[in-house]
Amino acid sequence: MIGEWCYMSNCFTSDECDEIVKLGLSQKLEEGKLGAKGSFVDTSYRKSKRAFLNSGRETDWIFKRFWEKAATANTDYFQIDYNQLDFIQFTSYEKDEYYHSHADLFVYETPQRKLSVTIQLTDESKYEGGDLNFENLEEYPSEEANAAMRQKGTAVFFPSFIRHSITNVTKGKRYSLVGWFLGPDWK
């Protein structure tokens, strides 16, 4: 593995992001949950709303873009063995919403989550807080990288075992897409 994280600007245009937000908000949003099987709501740990987008006529272009950008990021930074993307999560964070420190990997699930991606759908001027933070890295994002990761249309990739969080949104609304590429057990 060459890197622990990377970002790619302009993965989606501003208009595409707006279209995705409209699509996400047209779904039935539920409280964000913790865990895989037997998942549950715990607003002391995660407070957000989410809906799942499946591949289909309205969303195939989004899935295709996820696969294209993941292939580039994986080749350049991670070399992770993955082969599946079941769904994409649309997430909404409003004022006083957050997701405390967690990893996306479920060790006992097969196939395993291998490569995580989050795509920023909201213009950074429309909200405050809501930062994606990493933990226990060899090299943390610089101020410049952190600013770039907040830009609308930017994708951030990282191995699913990396601990991360979304800080409390203090003003406005933050929308994002999150995906997990799956593959065989970690070696």
Image (spheres, rainbow, N blue to C red):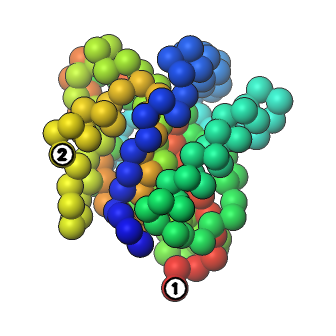
Looking at the rendered structure, the kind of residue marked 2 is Ser
Q: Earlier in the sequence, mark 1 or mark 2?
A: 2
Q: Disc 1 marks which residue?
A: 187
Q: What separation in Å lies between label 1 and label 2 (alpha carbons)?
A: 30 Å
Q: Is residue 80 left or right of residue 47?
A: right
Of the 4 image quadrants, the one containing the N terminus is bottom left
Foreground pick, 123 / 173: 123
Give the residue at mark 2.
142
For residue 159, side relative to residue 79 (left or right): left
The picture places residue 24, in percent across and down from the top left corner, at 60, 25
Q: Residue 186's x, y, as percent?
A: 52, 80
Figure quadrant of residue 149: top left
Q: Secondary structure at mark 1?
A: loop
Name the residue rendered at 76%, 35% in the picture: 60
In the image, residue 2 lies at what x, y percent? 38, 68
**What element does badge 2 sit on?**
loop
At 50% from the left and 17% from the top, the residue drawn is 14
